[in-house]
Amino acid sequence: MTKQHWLVSGVLVLLCGGVLVLFTDVEDSLTRWINCGPIATEAERRSTICR
């Protein structure tokens, strides 16, 4: 592989890693909102996850 191929591969790895981190953060926020949001029971809202 040439130097340009290594550079493109590195950029793609960083880009894919960034996308995975972004979607993980969004998924965590969405899950917390569903579990602790307005439709959650009172017991769920008092759990340690929601505090």
Image (cartoon, rainbow, N blue to C red):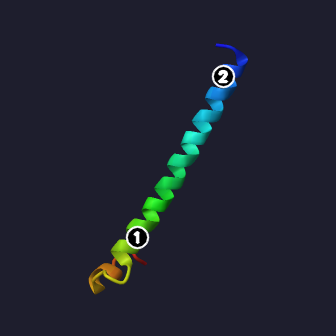
Query: Is residue 20 shown above or below 41?
Result: above
Mark 1 residue crowding within 10 angstroms, few (<14) / some (14–19) / many (20+):
few
Q: Quadrant of residue 46?
A: bottom left
Q: Is residue 46 visible?
A: no
Q: Name the element at disc 2.
A: helix
Which residue reaches farthest right? 3
Q: Residue at x 30, y 80 (%)?
A: 40
Which residue reaches farthest top? 1
Q: Residue at x 50, y 47 (%)?
A: 20
CA gap between label 2 and label 1 equals 39 Å
Q: Position of residue 29 (x, y in %)?
A: 46, 67
Q: Which of the two discs, 2 and 1, labels the residue nearer the N terminus?
A: 2
Q: Quadrant of residue 37?
A: bottom left
Q: Which residue is mark 2?
A: 6
Query: Is residue 13 shown above or below 31?
Result: above
Q: Residue at x 55, y 40 (%)?
A: 16
Q: Position of residue 13 (x, y in %)?
A: 58, 34
Q: Quadrant of the C terminus?
A: bottom left
Tag 1: amino acid: Arg
Tag 2: amino acid: Trp
Q: Is residue 29 visible?
A: yes
Q: Residue at x 64, y 13 (%)?
A: 1
Mark 2 residue crowding within 10 angstroms, few (<14) / some (14–19) / many (20+):
few
Q: Which residue is mark 1?
A: 32
Q: Position of residue 11 (x, y in %)?
A: 65, 34
Q: Nearer the viewer, mark 2 or mark 1?
A: 2
